[in-house]
Amino acid sequence: MKRHKLSNKREYHALIFMVSLIVIPPVAAVGALYAQSALVEQPLVHEHTDDPLWVPINGPKEATESVVDINLSWKEGSHLLSPELSGTVTEVSDSMALNSGDRFFSVDGVWVIAAKINYPFYREISKGMSGKDVASLNELLINLGFSGSSGDRWTWRTAQGVNSLARLVGLKQKTDPTFEPSWVISIPADHITLHGLKISVGQVAPSKGSEVATLTPTLENAEFEGNLPRKFDTDRGAFALKIEDSIYQYRDDDESLNTQWLSKNTKNISEKVSGILIDESTDGSFSVPASALVTSPNSDYCLVSKDPNGKISPVPAEVVGGDPVATFIQSELKNNYEVVAGLAASSLRNLCESD
């Protein structure tokens, strides 16, 4: 049999094309089936698998604590200004805390009391007088527990109260008493704390309007320095803030820290104070991998546990915190249990719903 020789290039190319139609499709089909088989048998990297990985739990944990710094902003304390006086300072109260009606200092044996008043005393007040200062005097007398009138006029009740006030400052009663503005130094609140004194026994009595004392600065604002530690940067509710030996409950949705409490528990007037933030919600909690948790149909969390006897069962859990490597949960687990981690979410959910 004679071989047929290809007479030109066109016939050669035509033959190659016909062969490809016969051979290539089956080869391609085999290759595709092989590739598909390889994809099925080889799980994608970083995806959960259906092969359970049992991991021991850690815990129970104690309350989470972190040291925090708090920046403080203070407003300078107000000044107490002297009424019109003459003579020599003969005594000064040794208490830096004063209530309205307390004796503050004395001049020539007559006490000046600290008092919260609503209108300044600028003149002597006696029988037959009326006005805003008389109304302020009546109110002061009543607040001190003495007799006084309810209006802006001097009455016999006012006279009785003024005699009682005279005894308080160290004077004798009179048939027709007169109130002296030098008996009272105005304070801005019913209770004050002094920060510094500018009078002392033996000095000349301060002149009218001169500064005799400075009140403790007022804490206007307090903020945590920087961001809270990640484990506290949540919306779970209240934490305990401890400074020195005092504790108060701080809510993470509060607009600001409790300045009144901080002011009371900050020994020094400083721009910064350190404290301890305590999250008691993690007390008694267990630490598990985040991949061990799945949400159940009612939006609660669930995990699958195995006890020391090998019994496998779904367990409800409450997430109470976490850190970059684990999640803290409250659950009925015990510290010798294991949990499933790395299982596909659908498989884990099926196990949780099987109970």
Image (cartoon, rainbow, N blue to C red):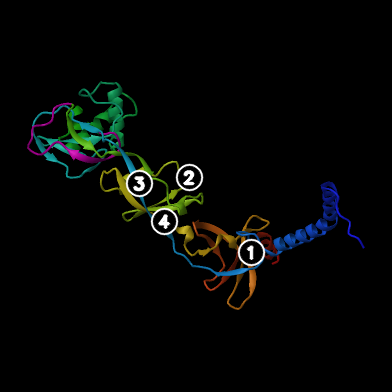
Q: Which residue is mark 4?
A: 278
Tag 2: residue type?
A: Asp
Q: Are marks 1 and 4 in contact (CB under 8 Å)?
A: no
Predominant secondary structure, magenta span: loop
Apparent side of residue 12 relative to residue 48 in the rendered image (left or right):
right
Q: Which residues are magenta?
A: 186-208
Q: Earlier in the sequence, mark 2 or mark 3?
A: 3
Cα gap from disc 3 to disc 4, whole angstroms: 15 Å
The spot of residue 315 in percent (x, y) is 62, 66
Decide if residue 93 is in sight here: yes
The CA span between labels 1 and 4 is 34 Å
Q: Is residue 118 above or below residue 9?
A: above
Residue 343's tag is 1
Circle 2 is placed at which residue position? 253
Q: Secondary structure at mark 4?
A: strand
Give me the C-alpha separation between circle 2 and circle 1.
36 Å
Q: Outermost residue, bottom direction?
A: 309
- Rendered-image quadrant of the C terminus: bottom right
Pointer 3: what residue?
A: 70
